[in-house]
Amino acid sequence: MAVQSVIDAGTHSDSGAGQPSSASRLGPSWLYALAIFLNAFLLFQVQPLIGKFILPWFGGAAAVWTVCLLFFQVALLLGYLYAHILTRRAAPRWQARIHIGLLALSFLVLPILPRETWKSTGGGDPSWRILLLLTLTVGLPYFLLSSTSPLLQSWYARSRAGAVPYRLYALSNVGSMLALVSYPALIEPKLTGTHQAVLWSATYVVSAILCACVAFGANAGLPAGGGMAGLASDSGAATGPRLSSKLMWMALAACGSALLVAISTHVTQNVASVPLLWVIPLALYLLSFILCFDSSFWYRRGVFLRLLSVALACMAYALSTSFAVLPLGLLVGLYCCGLFVCCMFCHGELVRLKPHPAHLTSFYLLISFGSALGAFFAALLAPRIFTGHFELQVALGCCAILVPVVYASDPRSRLYRARWQPAWIGLLGLTLAIVAGLAATVVEQSAHARLMVRNFYGVLSVVDQLTSQTAEGESQRSRKLMNGSIDHGMQWLSPSRRREPTAYYAADSGIGIALRAAGEQRSPLRVGVIGLGVGTLATYGRPGDHYSFYELNPLVARLARDEFSYIRDSAAQVDVVLGDGRLSLEREPGWQYDVLAVDAFSGDSIPVHMLTRQAFALYFAHLQPAGVLAVHISNNYLNLKPVVQAAATSQHKRATVIEHPGDRARGVFASTWVLLGNDGGYLGQQEIEGAGRRLPSAGGQLWTDDFSSLFSILD
């Protein structure tokens, strides 16, 4: 079988062939391969599963996913540490007993269904609550899954003379990649969250039993005093890796991990906010592991050094603001290809430095530690020390610097003895040029914006620009709020025009028509808006009206008040409520708004929990019987109409879609709004339905808090 061939290819060391020991008969090769593959698959399936499950409970998609990432990185590191200590300190029979005992203990937390008592009660940062929830819900199973690959590889190498198990690491990453690809394409569209959790838990039981069989077979035939000592006595293993080698392991792993997070963030926020786009960089990252650990055939240092020079130079130039006009497909392709080349260099050099199998667990432990450091820097530290997405420049610069460091420390390299020769000087010059170019892009990006600030939710920049708008050709200034490549609103700076509604909120847009039609029938109006932006909708406020904005990001609220004047100029009473809009509404009394607008979508990245059946039931619970619900569904890559249509049908509401083509001369963007109300009538029904077209009452995919699928509505 295929897995058998993978294992057989790795049963011989580089120095020669070895015959399997008698203990190997107790643990067939295919059993190791199957156990490692299945555990890696479950490891990457549970991450999106549990993250999506708790998303509606805490709101703030960026914050929730980042905290989940931190938890999984730390759990992975602890799993590798456990495998290292267990194989080093415990006798073989005790290794099996301890691991089997922990596997049995982990059954107590199954199925991995978090209790609703963990739901956020509002107020404060929920990070510690999320970490505790994950620890008690999936902590022990994830910890044991993380330890499987290094632990079983160690047992495999010990039970077979001369075995080199590193190809099993490639097999592990194949399982991870299949899990990554299959979840959005096969699992998420077919199963509810509860069914996913139950199926995962059942598969975990099978995987645990399989690992227990391997543990028993690998250790039953060895003497009680065995362990890694036998491997350590082999030739080539008596001398452990040098400190410089260990530092290089961590540096290469950290660089690859930091590049993955930084490029994923840059591509999805600054280039194209395409749903599921993050899958591509992660798949390429895993592919580089698979190829490099599979065979030395795939990584040729001379070839990839040249490719790396081109990739780093191209990405450095692409970060310049003057290259922002390049086609999106070209930029996405450039960064994804660049990531793959960089990761092939980092992981290819890791394989070249791999130690004797006696030191396998310490090798994987330090790789995991380095990867955790890289992810920690890019995901958690960078948002707190940088005002922009400058971690990408830092990661690319570190990758460039690692090239001469690798050559300087490798006696087998051609440049090792050619220091201060033209080739060596040329390499150093190229490295310095790339680093200098990256530093220049940091200065350029900072100077491009009037103001740039950053927090846990992303980078916000305020940009002033000149635009010729009047019939006479007079140039007028406007100010925009940007989140990466996404416009969050704009305002004319001229006193005569600064109260004009712009962007997606023009008077003839869906929300503009809804507010005008409702205002003609009722005064004063009480209006709720989920998503503040620059506060443009406040300009519709009249004396006596009350507008409540719900905003997750406190920096958005600060900039809307300090850098834009819509809120200050409004004739209505305006309140800004900080926190996730849905969670805030759940804590407030119902039946209060005449118009409720849902505009919480950051470009093409949508908080799914805002479009579920439960969410729409909550919205209508906060509307007067004749109230209007306005949902902004403008999107370049997702067709959200069927989702809103199904939600309207589930609530027995009438839905009208109003599309506006946009008018850049007036600072108005193309927009699509869906307005919903009671079948028996709602405020401005005749005018609203005259401006748009009704959505049919049948069809569409109904999302719930337990089921949703972005893959099925990709446009």
Image: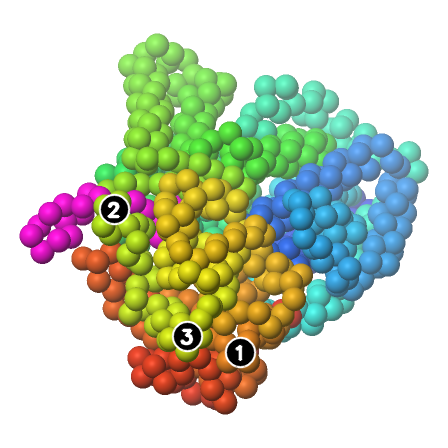
Q: Mark 3 and mark 1: span between their CA atoms?
A: 22 Å
Q: Secondary structure at mark 2?
A: loop
Q: Reply yes or no: does residue 479 show up in magenta.
A: yes
Q: Residue at x 64, y 55 (%)?
A: 58
Compared to residue 259, the image places residue 186 above or below, namely below
Q: Residue furthest right?
A: 224
Is residue 459 or residue 22 the one in the foreground?
A: 459
The residue that disc 2 covers is 495
Q: Reply yes or no: does residue 61 show up in magenta.
A: no
Of the 4 image quadrants, the one containing the N terminus is bottom right
The residue that disc 3 covers is 518
Along the polypeptide, which appears first: circle 2 or circle 3?
2
Residue 703 percent location from the top left of the image: 56, 74
Q: Which residues are magenta?
A: 466-489
The residue that disc 1 covers is 647
Q: Residue at x 44, y 58 (%)?
A: 572
Q: Main secondary structure of the magenta part?
A: strand
Along the polypeptide, which appears first: circle 2 or circle 1?
2
Label number found at residue 630: none
Q: Dot 2, how many residues are within 10 Å of its Cα: few (below 14), some (14-19), or many (20+)? A: few
